[in-house]
Amino acid sequence: MFYKTKTNKINNESRAMLALRMIDTVNKSGIEDAKVSNAFVQLEAVNARYQIAIEPGTAKQVSLSITDKYKERTTLFVSMYEYVYGLLNSPDDEMKAAATLLFEQLSKYGKNFSAYRLADRSLRYIRILESLKMPEYEAALTKTLLSAKLTELDQVQLDYEELYMGRGNTFATKTAPSSLSKELNDAIKLYMDEVNWMATRTNTEAWYTLRNNLQKRFDEVNITSTRKPADTITETPTSTNV
């Protein structure tokens, strides 16, 4: 049958539109048996999962937010590093002592972590933050007026990790359209086979009309027989920067 080859040649969005129009056509057919068959129930179930899979995600927006937090974290840390470094030359002995104590922790991995992998950079920030939150540094932070800045850096680090891990969890659980394409194709073909069989068996105008209307749904989607259109949905967006 023509639909068996046409179904394989359409892209993700056309396939999704075809399934939606087929289901709508059946629901409006007035044939109760056409709406309660196992093949139709299966088509509806697969289509529901497929429609979710091809929805444009928020990957780009999330990646931008991660990049913003990454830059904010770097800016905050560098500003603290340079501020404390400047205080090492303070004429105030107490201020100089406080700065020396803090700088020992701020500088233990250097000022710039760009040579390390992303996870390694985050680990270094975490280690520094853990150290500076210890009781023995409280007085030095108060003396240098850095208590609020440390809290801010700590929060930005937490926000960054939450966004970064959240993106990874989303990608891990999201079903790629390509993995459902064959399943939806099979469900469409199975239902069309059933409609053809019912039209022949019952020899009624209602079933023949449904079959003809469903065939029109295939003609309505944009199909190129010589070239398979490129899918417009990005299945696994990734970021190479952060």
Image (spheres, helix red, strand yellow):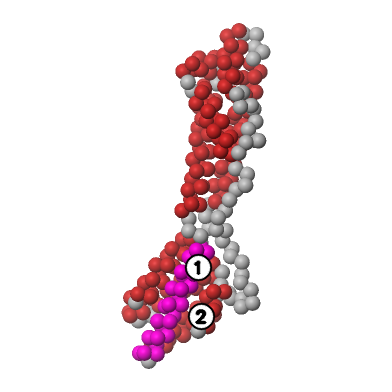
- Residue 220 at x, y percent in the picture: 54, 77
Q: Secondary structure at mark 2?
A: helix
Q: Position of residue 115 (x, y in %)?
A: 65, 35
* Disc 2: which residue: 3
**As shown in the figure, which amino acid type bears the numbered disc 1?**
Ser
Question: At numbered mark 1, what does the secondary structure look like: helix, strand or loop?
Answer: helix
Span colored in magenta: 177-202
* Residue 74 in the image, given as x and y percentages of width and height: 61, 33
The circle on residue 120 is: none
Residue at the spot 53% in from the left edge and 18% down from the top edge: 141
Residue contact at pointers 2 and 1, CB within 8 angstroms = no
Residue 23's place in the image compared with 210, above or below, is above
Q: How many marks?
A: 2
Magenta: main secondary structure equals helix
Q: Is residue 133 above or below residue 223?
A: above
Residue ID at (56%, 61%)? 233
Determine if the magenta segment contains residue 193: yes
Q: Is residue 125 above or below residue 216?
A: above
- The amino acid type of the residue labelled 2 equals Tyr
